[in-house]
Amino acid sequence: MTAPERGYADYQYQIYVRGLQDAVPPFTTDLGALEDQARDRLGPKPYWYIAGAAGTGATARANRAAFDRHRIVPRMLRDATARDQRTTVLGSELPAPVVLAPIGVQSQVHPEGELATARAAAATGVPMVLSTAASHTIEEVAEANGDGQRWFQLYWPHDDEVTASILKRARTSGYTALVVTLDTWQLAWRPHDLDQAYLPFLRGDGVAIPLSDPVFRSRLERPVEEDPQGAAMQWLPIFSGKAHTWDELGFLREHWDGPIVLKGIVHPEDARRAVRAGMDGIVVSNHGGRQVDGAVAALDALVDVVAEVGTETEVLFDSGIRSGADVFKALALGARAVLLGRPYVYGLALGGAAGVEHVVRGLLADFDLTMGLSGCTTLADIGPDTLHAGGGGEVRR
Amino acid sequence: MTAPERGYADYQYQIYVRGLQDAVPPFTTDLGALEDQARDRLGPKPYWYIAGAAGTGATARANRAAFDRHRIVPRMLRDATARDQRTTVLGSELPAPVVLAPIGVQSQVHPEGELATARAAAATGVPMVLSTAASHTIEEVAEANGDGQRWFQLYWPHDDEVTASILKRARTSGYTALVVTLDTWQLAWRPHDLDQAYLPFLRGDGVAIPLSDPVFRSRLERPVEEDPQGAAMQWLPIFSGKAHTWDELGFLREHWDGPIVLKGIVHPEDARRAVRAGMDGIVVSNHGGRQVDGAVAALDALVDVVAEVGTETEVLFDSGIRSGADVFKALALGARAVLLGRPYVYGLALGGAAGVEHVVRGLLADFDLTMGLSGCTTLADIGPDTLHAGGGGEVRR
Amino acid sequence: MTAPERGYADYQYQIYVRGLQDAVPPFTTDLGALEDQARDRLGPKPYWYIAGAAGTGATARANRAAFDRHRIVPRMLRDATARDQRTTVLGSELPAPVVLAPIGVQSQVHPEGELATARAAAATGVPMVLSTAASHTIEEVAEANGDGQRWFQLYWPHDDEVTASILKRARTSGYTALVVTLDTWQLAWRPHDLDQAYLPFLRGDGVAIPLSDPVFRSRLERPVEEDPQGAAMQWLPIFSGKAHTWDELGFLREHWDGPIVLKGIVHPEDARRAVRAGMDGIVVSNHGGRQVDGAVAALDALVDVVAEVGTETEVLFDSGIRSGADVFKALALGARAVLLGRPYVYGLALGGAAGVEHVVRGLLADFDLTMGLSGCTTLADIGPDTLHAGGGGEVRR
Amino acid sequence: MTAPERGYADYQYQIYVRGLQDAVPPFTTDLGALEDQARDRLGPKPYWYIAGAAGTGATARANRAAFDRHRIVPRMLRDATARDQRTTVLGSELPAPVVLAPIGVQSQVHPEGELATARAAAATGVPMVLSTAASHTIEEVAEANGDGQRWFQLYWPHDDEVTASILKRARTSGYTALVVTLDTWQLAWRPHDLDQAYLPFLRGDGVAIPLSDPVFRSRLERPVEEDPQGAAMQWLPIFSGKAHTWDELGFLREHWDGPIVLKGIVHPEDARRAVRAGMDGIVVSNHGGRQVDGAVAALDALVDVVAEVGTETEVLFDSGIRSGADVFKALALGARAVLLGRPYVYGLALGGAAGVEHVVRGLLADFDLTMGLSGCTTLADIGPDTLHAGGGGEVRR
């Protein structure tokens, strides 16, 4: 959980020094360009499942465009030689304000899937959020993660006993915080997947967590091993197609004694309601543009949500992070930490745990350098006064 | 006229389940991408007649850009499991707020033309609007449409007896509402068609409605069958080249005892005048960018028109709908229903009635999912407060 | 000088009717696309001399972008069947508010150069403005133009006797108005021409007007015929490299008894000064983006100039006209007429006089249809209330 | 130091006249296009080191976009025949408001590196700013620069004796002003270089200034000649990785008796502090987008900084200059002079000193013509009233 002695920027130094022996990094250091490298590696089904967005892709584009409307105004001659990225999120100390977002079915891009992610998370010190739709079990991932920090993401089943069972397993396995995803109780219209009629869960592999759950298994007529696809078809309606409501949150609190955060909030009134419901935090997110097409850019929503509840609860940010500058801007606009999504899965696709580590170290180095060069020593220095909204600029494509 | 038992989103589920047998949808599920597939199928003349726009294409681009300036702000933890898209438009109950726009000469893209469209409309429950410039007669289309809902679009002739005859045939054949197109009493400057010197009507085929009209036929010196091109040349000046005026609307009311809506209104003062003239509704439209180049985006006009007469008459929207998010936004800005144009004709070109069905089912599924994921259960939930105008985003190309 | 009996829109009808015999127009009807066709025909030197702009091309792009920020709001059910484009400009009656802009050295794109343009102008009834840098003499062009309307553009020499001689020849030859170009007393930095080291005038051909002037010829030591390049080198400093000033305008008035307009005014204070100096009109222009790179878009300047002097003098518009909608917008913003530039020269390059005619007839037809479909019968109907500035849209590239 | 007799625009005339003998310029006259020519010439390592930017390149794009938001409004009929670009910057008279920006390690693009730049600077009269990271020594460059004006850029070492030694050498060698770069005490995250693991300094060549410094050499255990790479590794931490602070500025003043300017200031409060610290000027710069990705556009920062301290100190501008219009706009917004960066290094890559001269002469000619055609005779005429901020336009890519 400790940063490298010379700080996260050390990763940059190591790359240059290794260059003296004509060694280049195994993967690109441009998180945007990683997508192209992953595209060359993966088949079209997993590639588009990861890279694709809902509908016309308008939300994913809006996510990126919103970052370009805010510009950093660096300060000079400040003693920002040593930066401290440490922060406290949901009561835990984090070495950096970055968390690996929950992404399901990682076995489709690399055989080690979430196990590799868990090892990379432990090695870099950032928490990982394990998805309910993971390809490896809660317990296997916990073991791979070891002393690392791990949170658990819940796709909230419509079977209270299954829910309670899963939550109990997660707590027992050392997952400290619960991230309840609200925006995906039903998959959106995703042409890239629909045109390939590809839904990884349906084939009965790659969704180890529900299929391994003893309560769920007790519901099945035939064991999963004999009829994995049949089990998947039974699993689907428990997890998908029905919405939960505000008044049910008490059930989660009852079965989870750690912090609970709601992921997918973009409306300030929903944020207010989450606070009233006693939640411990909010993840402003539009699911990386994978759910409602034409939705508000996550960064625009962050501004609204922080204005409403920023002083009362912890607001995390997810959707569109591709660089250290993006981390900086989200924090300057009030996020306590950010979730990194697709880029680390591209790293996983390209190089397993080593690929994930490369991505995380690169992002932390980039953010560390951005902090320093902007004159910021701690995260507390990154306030709204570090940004400039005027003028313009244009989005990278 | 009833939605599928599991709701329109069921179409998404069916696609994924069929994927387990390695079946993919016959056509793309991305209405934007359909245009490319149709382009590969059709010759340049019909393709550009359908896909092209007036002049430099500025209006068509503006139509799309306007959608991107409005962003949906989804709400969480609402019980939007089952969505009800039903609405009442012009006194008729509709299963969904979507209507197939009047598009003429459909035989140029598929031999069954409007007959196939009529069957698909009946199968999906959405009304179709039959164009005066259709390739099949009023009666043939009515028969193909069966129990479906059908409206009739009028290119208003400059021969009152012909007008009266056509209106009578339409009423007799079960067309319930009359859609009077105001913006195309003369074709605009359309370089794509002019460069090919292509005007489908002129060749005397594909415009069955006027040519089949007994009053019109009585005007001809030689029967249509002997000289179809000559008949077309006589037909043209009756339908084109002269404007009608506000004081003539009484004639239509006199010869049509159902609801009448004016299509092509974009100025709020014209909307006001339509209300004063006792019209039953307005279709805000710039004819998909096919008429005045450089015209106001239809969605921008919708905002103005709704502000002026939104509480006094029914305002429908046409021009630019390509996704469920577009339907959502138009309704949020005050439209009671939308007209879907080019995409269903691309479906027709690719697969006849099955192609049209695919497009309609896809759009309704997409909209249904958008409603649900935005927390809306009925259309009444889709108000202006569901949109966010700030920030930005960029248009899809 | 009379419009076709069925109005300018008749050109559209003729194209479609000829299509029945499978004839297509010899050149594209999209004025923007004409540029590509001309590029294929011309060598890089003349092509870039015509199509190129100053510096980075920012002004030319801004010219086009400005049009897209204004949107037409068409009105319905108005009796706009017959449109009248006639107007009075500088005391002369014009059949349409379009004038052929002065463009020099037209022999580089077609051997008949300005003679062909003059014939096409006469045939279509629009005035042509003959450039001082024309490849044919004042008298030859006048003869080719016959009963047509012609104006004379002055690149103002720094030799009063030469100036007086040229003006006298122009008046004698029936040129009615004088257009004094102010913005090009020195050529700008034009990389396209510089990279080819191409300046058509310098080779001593293609600039018949100065070289044919008896006063200028009397200045030469050797006759033009013996040393055309030497003559050109002597001609250059008389016409270029030195600015004139406001107090010299009296000289022009003294030697020209018709109306005088100043071309190249973009600042409202300069417009005010032109009025005070007793000028008869202003042409708002940035020379099609060929002079100051990064300059204000001509349409933005038009708004400022009209606000300052629109009620006191005639304001014409030049720079960026590519369609009927552009003509409409310029008029709606206060221009009395527009000058059409590059497109007609592309027509000339492709087809001589017939090519120019095609371009002019196409533009007038497009504008005529735009008027009609917007509900405008006369130019007086085209006011600022016909435009919508809100929303957006994007520029065509 | 004197401009050509006919003014800087003479370079344009010379090109056209040489064209009569079919000679074209050896390199493009479009500073933007130079980048492509240089790309073809250089290997990917030096090319990307020069052309690349930090992170996603957002800052570099924003720099260019900001220029397009300001538009020049040229004035007519002013006597701007002869332009005078002379100005006084930091107490020295300059023939033009253009300075060659400090760029290090120029030997990577041309063997003569800074020596060629120094000769071209002397030949054209513009000052050069020698980078601390130059490939040739302070003394060698001074000799090559001869009677030219030269300033010295400091990457401020963390070894006071080395700093003092370098400053003394620079003063002794005739460098008149000191430019202290504040924004690069640590390199940013630059994917183009990282992906190639390329840092030119590290190999021990191309950084002649520190390696030649006697104080620095006395620190080494082994002579540079025996172990250049070891020396570089020792040099790096002295120059990089640690920030200086405001209270250390006194040390520089103590060791430099000429004017001192701070480069890299973009926040108005930092500008205010520089004035309070007694600095002689500020260079508003974001290092050409090479440091903080997502930073404010330099031109937007210029507006803020000029508003804060424009009347109290000299404000220079750096980052994004590519044309005469850019120079004009920066001056109109309050800059006293501009620094030209990448383009001259492209010229160096293509043609050594002759290439640099070509670039400088081209820029001065372009700016000279822009001044004249905008009606400006001296730099004092270029005020904020020469710009138009309304409307729009779009950025060149």
Image (cartoon, coloured by chain):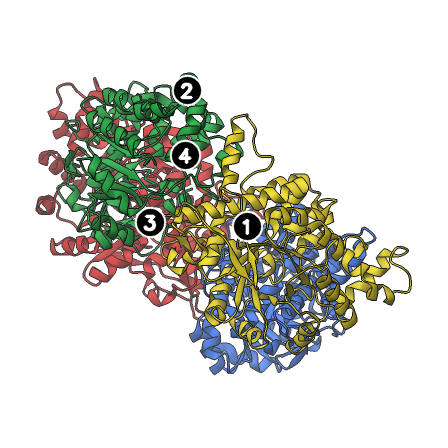
Chain colours: A green, B yellow, C blue, D red
Residue A222's disc is 2
Mark 4 or mark 2, which is nearer the start of the sequence?
A: 2
Label 4–label 3 contact, CB within 8 A: no
The residues tagged by marks 4 and 3 sit, at their Cα atoms, a distance apart of 78 Å
- The front one of B120 and A198 is B120
- The front one of B220 and B50 is B220
Q: Amino acid at mark 3?
A: Gly
Q: Amino acid at mark 4?
A: Pro
Chain identity of mark 2: A
The residues tagged by marks 2 and 4 sit, at their Cα atoms, a distance apart of 17 Å
Let me know if residue A145 appears in the view. yes
Q: Amino acid at mark 1?
A: Asp
Quarter of the rendering containing residue C201: bottom right
Q: Residues within 10 Å of mark 4 (few under 14, many from 20)?
A: some
Camera-near label (3 vs 1) is 1
Same chain for the residues at labels 2 and 4, yes or no?
yes
Q: Amino acid at mark 2?
A: Arg
The residues tagged by marks 3 and 2 sit, at their Cα atoms, a distance apart of 88 Å
**Looking at the picture, does residue B256 appear above or below residue B111?**
below
Identify the element where label 2 is drawn. loop
Identify the element where label 3 is drawn. loop
* Residue picked out by circle 1: C193
Tell me residue C313's x, y (percent).
53, 80
Camera-near label (4 vs 3) is 4
Label 3–label 1 contact, CB within 8 A: no
Label 2–label 4 contact, CB within 8 A: no
The residues tagged by marks 2 and 1 sit, at their Cα atoms, a distance apart of 79 Å
* Residue picked out by circle 4: A237
The residues tagged by marks 1 and 4 sit, at their Cα atoms, a distance apart of 68 Å
Chain identity of mark 4: A
Camera-near label (1 vs 4) is 4
